[in-house]
Image: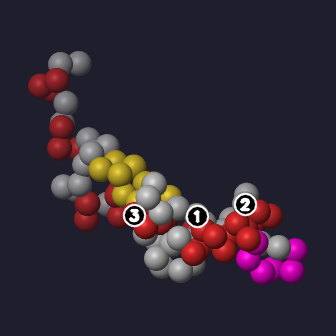
Amino acid sequence: MELGTINKDKIRINAIAPGFFLTEQNRNILRNEDGTLSPRAEKIIEHTPVGRLGKPEEIVSTAIWLCSDASQFVTGTIVPVDGGFSKFSGV
């Protein structure tokens, strides 16, 4: 296919850079058996300006936005969804 035949306005390349989210996959390292935060989770939250772990729906809403016409002029970017962790922690 020649480049001239590609509908370039329909192609967007973006990514989501997630922070720390409490999910079934990492629950055992972020919560103690009694449900309190583990030392690791406390350290993460200490370096997260929002002051908490993320909620899965916060990633979903960002993905929906990137797939919608609301972001049709957004391309070539990485959207951090991390409560400010990457800016505050020096990552």
Residue 25 shown in magenta:
no
Query: Quick one: 24 or 53, which is closer to the camera?
Result: 53
Q: Which quarter of the rendering shows the C terminus?
A: bottom left
State whether residue 13 appears in this view.
yes
Three-letter code, disc 2: Asn
Magenta span covers which residues? 33-38
User: In this rendering, is residue 27 above or below 51?
Assistant: above
Q: Give the residue pinned by disc 2.
A: 26
Q: Residue 50: percent from the left, percent from the top?
A: 48, 79
Query: Quick one: 46 or 54, which is closer to the camera?
Result: 46
Residue 37 shown in magenta:
yes
Q: Which quarter of the rendering shows the N terminus?
A: top left
On screen, residue 19 versus residue 37, left or right, reads left
Mark 2 vs mark 1: which is more N-terminal? 1
Mark 1 vs mark 3: which is more N-terminal? 1
On screen, residue 42 versus residue 38, left or right, reads left
Q: Are marks 2 and 1 in contact (CB under 8 Å)?
A: yes
Crowding at dot 1, Cα within 10 Å, few <14 / some 14-19 / many 20+, comes out as: many
On screen, residue 21 versus residue 10, left or right, reads right
Crowding at dot 3, Cα within 10 Å, few <14 / some 14-19 / many 20+, comes out as: few
Q: Give the residue pinned by disc 3.
A: 87
Query: Quick one: 41 or 1, which is closer to the camera?
Result: 41
Q: Residue furthest front?
A: 90
Three-letter code, disc 1: Phe
Residue 20: mark in rendering? 1
